[in-house]
Image (spheres, rainbow, N blue to C red):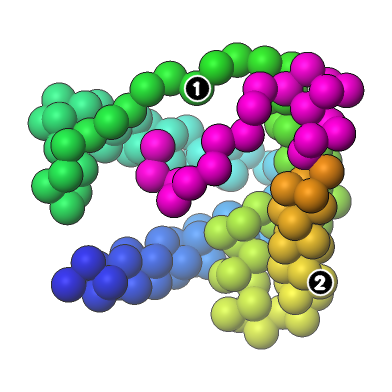
Amino acid sequence: MLFVFMIVAGTVFGLLLSRSGAADYDYIQAMFLFENEQLYGILCVAVSVAALGFWLLKKSGRTVTGEPLNCRPKPSHPGNIYGGLLFGVGWSMTGMCPGPILVNIGEGKLYAICAFVGAIAGAYSFGALYPRLQRWLGLPAMEEGPGQG
C-alpha cells in the first residue's frame, strides 16, 4: 500500500514540476538571472506546504505510516555552506536538482541523463572522499545506516 502511495505521490509531484515549469531549463536559468519571478513563487509555496506538513507531523508525533516520529536537529557545520554552494552551482549549471532530473528524463530530454550520471557520480565521490574532506573541512563523523533519521 505504501509503495502504491509513493508511486502516485511521485507521479503527481513530477507532473506538477513539469506543468509549472519548475523542471524547464529556460525557466530555471531565467530565475537565476532574475528575469522571471515565477519559480520564486513556486518555491515559496513548496516551502510553505512542506512547513505545514512537518508541523502537522510533529504535532501528531507519528509518521505517515504510524511509526513514532524521531526528528532531531542536524548540527550546523562548515560543510552546510560548502554543500549548499556546490548544490547551487550544479543546479544553476544543469538547470536541474534531483527531482527535475527525473522529470526531464521522463519528458525524453536526453541531456538530463548526463545530469543524472553526474549526480550519481558526485554522490559516490562524496562518499568515497568524505574521510579526507572530513579532516580538511572540519566536518562531523558521517552517520551510516538506513537513512531514517
Q: Amino acid at mark 2?
A: Cys
- Residue 17 versus residue 51 in the image, above or below: below
Residue nearest the observer in this picture, 74 or 102: 74
Percent position of residue 35, x then y? 76, 40
User: Dot 2: within a 10 Å radius of its alpha carbon, few (fewer than 14), some, or many (20 or more) residues?
Assistant: few
- Residue 11 versus residue 61 in the image, above or below: below
Which residue is at the far bottom?
108
Residue nearest the observer in this picture, 52 or 75: 75
Label 2 and label 1: CA atoms lie apart by 31 Å
Is 131 placed left or right of 75 in the picture?
right
- Mark yes or no: residue 79 visible: yes
Residue nearest the observer in this picture, 95 or 75: 75
Q: Amino acid at mark 1?
A: Lys
Q: Which image quarter is the N terminus in?
A: bottom left
For label 1, the residue is: 74
Location of residue 86 (image quadrant)? top right
Q: Residue at coordinates 71% horizontally, 31% vertically from top-left?
A: 84
Write the start and end of the magenta stretch as one range.
130-149
Q: Residue at coordinates 31% horizontally, 66% vertically from top-left?
A: 6
For label 2, the residue is: 114
Q: Residue at coordinates 78% horizontally, 27% vertically from top-left?
A: 134
Is 148 placed left or right of 142 in the picture?
left
